[in-house]
Image (cartoon, rainbow, N blue to C red):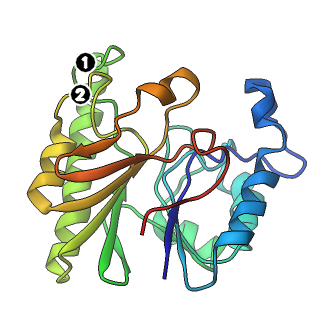
Amino acid sequence: MHIFAISDLHLSGDPPFKPMSVFGEHWHDHWTKIKADWLEKVTPDDIVLLPGDISWAMKLEEALPDLRAIDALPGRKVIVRGNHDYWWQTVSKMTRVVGGQITFLHNTFTPAGPFAICGSRGWTCPGDRSFIEAEDMPIYLRELNRVRATLTAAVQAGYRRHILMLHYPPVNDRHEPSGFTDLMEEFGVEICVFGHLHDEAIHTAPTGIFGGAACYLVSCDALDFKLKCIV
């Protein structure tokens, strides 16, 4: 079993109603590039982590073509919500309409061999240039509770090795410790994957060890539209 990760697919149907090439020529036909690499690397026994911003759709019904396109690819897929995933509904509803090999994480975890895959959306951390106390702090605290819930569920089920999926980086733009890194250290998280960052922000992403975990930016454009093998 291998575990791969890639985020921020930003799909919008076929043909796409929002072509990503508006954000730069390197995004031209990006889904074709991702699928080609996926088919080359991933077997049915593997797992692919997708940390958010899956589809531009506003409703679950509109996102179904994108989710089904992902479901048709090899491997078991695990998804957490991104800030642009407005189509997100309850886990039971999403699971029911999609079926297949997609797992949606919300306040829980999913097994992956010796690992527990834990995750939530995360949020901008205090101290970040874009952090607005009155607006962001309640969401940040709520996401901390969700991350604690998913890690706690894994521990209660007997798992001691954890991979954490976040959409947002686990630290602010100055790479200072946060509530997320505190939780990573408390629960002994080994690997943290995240997306959200694009363009120039890719070069300022936190990489290396934070909160005791190896952290990887897996936004698809940061990976040249290729999946990253993390285990």
Q: Residue at x 78, y 62 (%)?
A: 36
In the rendered image, the vertical position of residue 65 relative to residue 98, given as above or below: above
In the rendered image, the vertical position of residue 134 relative to residue 183, given as above or below: above
Which quarter of the figure is the C terminus placed in? bottom left
Q: Is residue 166 visible?
A: no
In the rendered image, the vertical position of residue 8 relative to residue 229, given as above or below: above
Residue 189 is labelled as none
Q: Nearer the viewer, residue 212 or 169?
A: 212
Q: Position of residue 68 (x, y in %)?
A: 73, 67
Q: Quadrant of residue 99?
A: bottom right
Q: Residue at x 49, y 76 (%)?
A: 2
Residue extending farthest to the left is 186
Q: Which residue is mark 2?
A: 137
Q: Position of residue 188 (x, y in %)?
A: 15, 62
Q: Nearer the viewer, residue 41 or 105?
A: 41
Neighbour class for label 2 at 10 Å: few (<14), some, many (≥20)? some
Q: Nearer the viewer, residue 27 or 118?
A: 27
| In-image side of 133 versus 110 (left or right) | left
Identify which amino acid the numbered label 1 is placed on.
Ala
Q: Tell me if label 1 and label 2 are in contact, CB under 8 Å.
A: yes
Identify which amino acid the numbered label 2 is placed on.
Met
Residue 134 is labelled as 1
Q: CA distance from mark 1 to mark 2?
A: 6 Å
Neighbour class for label 1 at 10 Å: few (<14), some, many (≥20)? few
| In-image side of 154 versus 119 (left or right) | left
